[in-house]
Amino acid sequence: MKKHFFKWFVIILVLTAFPACKKEAKTSIDTAESVQSLQTAEKIDIDFTNLNYNMASALIFDMLANQEDYLGKRIKIKGQFFASQDDFGSFLAVLLYDATACCQTGFTFEDDSRHYPEDYPALLEDIEIVGVYSKKYYGDIEFAYIDCGK
């Protein structure tokens, strides 16, 4: 009986040891690839693409109320594109709508590497932007926006 038990114990030990080694080796490769991809990609500090409307609108409100805590952070957001013209030039925004589409929130953004309207989707089509949360002044008015680059 002891001999039979020992035999099964060794078999189970061997079967569990080999897959563990293989998985560990795979994890090492995955980790190395992940580190390499993180080094080449720019870090996103706040990703709105995974938030529902309630969480996104709460975070946007906090960003407006506590701007100094968020300035310089890289933001990723996906929503509907909106644009208009005013005295200051083109006004570009990405909008998020709630489930009933009655209420929206979002960000204005600037991207000097693109030109409106030829480099943007049609109004209210989906757009995803990545940029740095910034502020500037128009006269005495402070204006928060996402700077998508030059």
Image (cartoon, helix red, strand yellow):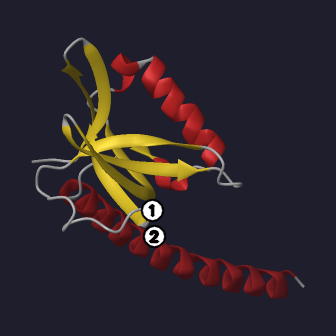
Residue behind mark 1: 124
Observer-nearest of 6 and 92: 92
In this rendering, position of residue 112 left or right of residue 18: left
Q: Residue at image x 34%, y 41%? A: 108
Amino acid type, residue under disc 1 in the picture: Leu
Observer-nearest of 42 and 57: 57
Within-10-Å neighbours for mark 1: few <14, some 14–19, many 20+: few
Q: Residue at image x 14%, y 59%? A: 115
In this rendering, position of residue 32 left or right of residue 124: left
Q: Using the image, determine if residue 113 lies above or below residue 121.
A: above
Q: In which quarter of the image is residue 132?
A: top left
Q: Which residue lies furthest to the right in this view?
A: 1
User: How far apart are the alpha carbons under marks 2 and 1?
Assistant: 47 Å
Q: Quadrant of the N terminus?
A: bottom right
Q: So how many labels did they put on this image?
A: 2
Secondary structure type for disc 1? loop
Residue 94 % position (x, y): 40, 50
In this rendering, position of residue 35 left or right of residue 19: left
Nearest-to-viewer mark from 2 and 1: 1
Residue 45 seen: no
Residue 59 % position (x, y): 53, 33
Observer-nearest of 53 and 8: 53
Residue behind mark 2: 24
Secondary structure type for disc 2? helix
Q: Residue at image x 31%, y 49%? A: 84
Residue 139 seen: yes
Amino acid type, residue under disc 2 in the picture: Glu
Residue 33 % position (x, y): 29, 68
